[in-house]
Amino acid sequence: MLSPKIIVLSTGSELTAGRSQDTNSSWIANELFGMGFTVSKFMVLPDDPSILQEEIRTLAALSTKEQPVLIVMTGGLGPTEDDYTLEVTCKLTGVGSVESPIARKRIETIYKLRGRNFQEALQTAIRQISVPENSIILNNSVGIAPGFIVSLGENAYLSCMPGVPGEMTSMFQEELSPWISKNFSAQELHSGFRFIWWMSESQFQKEFISKEKTILSGKVIWGVAAKRGYIRVSFQSADRKAVNELLEKLDTVYGAKSTLDVFEELPKILTERKITVGTAESCTGGLIAKTLTDRAGSSAYFYGSIVSYDNSIKSGLLGVQQETLDTFGAVSKETAKEMAEGALIALKTDYTISVTGIAGPGGGTPEKKVGLVYFGIGQKNGSTEVQEHYFPFSRSSFREFAAHTGIYLLYNHLKRFT
């Protein structure tokens, strides 16, 4: 068996017009990587049969005896007039369409349960449950429209799945994935990643990537994605040692700023060590608490949050002294410290994260500019750690930067002191 050149193709005019986001492609690529396959190209095309036919024919022509082509396509399998995947595939392969017996039985059952006369919508239903003649049918256990696999000539294959994410993911895992594993040879690939905090993509490429021989030679493939407050750096290679050496070098060069997935690791630490936490938030408006509680099981370690947007709440519920507010202001290291310590008392937790800053667009001064933010990490029966940061971004970006940074600071504190 050979390893294929894989192209992931998403179709939909709503995608090319920017009205919807293509999340299918990245999900498919990640699944394929876990199987030992890599994607060579992503494409997004509109609901235009002539464009689809031309592009798919061009992609199929890339196949060779040594390297087959596999096009993994999503979208265009619904019942409406702008769903062209079946029509285009039949033209490319020179065959007609036939009903999928399993899909037919499924849609009849659904219509009966809904109390509708199946015969009234038969023509639309046939369009939705049809596949090209002689194709391999990919059954749909979530929706109605089946997917299919066809040969586009020697060493070229087209697999088509619905664009609805829930239907596509189920079909890929249950139907397409086993077929790919059976018909193609996977590479043994190794990967690893790190978060690098408060780092830009361009700076990282200049000071790290540009100096690494294994990357420059193509031995290791790298990727970077900019997030709010950090970048996610990933490496991939058939050489496990090369990947591990790069990860170790990242940890050496960037120290505590190089981490695993903090949003995965912090809950593990809190759960394993039976540590409880809470937050005292001002400028983030509860976003740190929201991020911490996005994970199932967070009730084991997260007790609550006091969103002290107004100074009266800072003093009334968190015990921040009026003198502190008058002398240093709400956005200050002194206030952040007292917020964290007041939350420890109010929430009765082992640790707290406090945050106070100027999210903008207004509210800044020459001394305290928009983007200034202070964090406090409070510890029961211990000292409070306060840090100052500056995130000169839009209001929404500032809040995400601040929320993610607060979580990182607690993670880093626990790694250093417990």
Image (tube, rainbow, N blue to C red):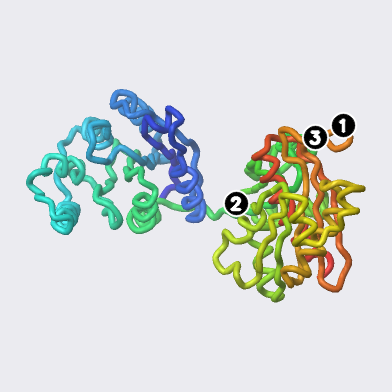
In the rendering, at what x and y percent does residue 104 appear? 15, 52
Label 1 crowd (10 A; few <14 / some 14-19 / many >=20): few
Asked whether, in this view, residue 158 is left or right of residue 35, the answer is left
Q: Which residue is mark 1?
A: 366
Do residues under tags 3 and 2 come within 8 Å of each other at their CB atoms?
Answer: no
Q: In terms of depth relative to the viewer, which is nearer, 279 or 70?
A: 279
Q: Alpha carbon of mark 3 to alpha carbon of mark 2: how far?
A: 51 Å
For the question of whether residue 373 can be seen, the reply is yes
- Examine the image and state in which quarter residue 280 appears: bottom right
Q: What number is the disc on residue 364?
A: 3
Sequence-first tag of 3 and 2: 2
Label 3 crowd (10 A; few <14 / some 14-19 / many >=20): some
Q: In terms of depth relative to the viewer, which is nearer, 156 or 101?
A: 101
Do residues under tags 2 and 1 come within 8 Å of each other at their CB atoms?
Answer: no
User: Mark 2 is on which residue type?
Assistant: Ala
- Examine the image and state in which quarter residue 268 appears: bottom right
Residue at 50 percent of width and 38 percent of height: 40
**Quarter of the figure with the C terminus:** bottom right
Q: What number is the disc on residue 238?
A: 2
Residue at 86 percent of width and 46 percent of height: 329
User: Mark 3 is on which residue type?
Assistant: Gly
Residue at 72 percent of width and 47 percent of height: 283
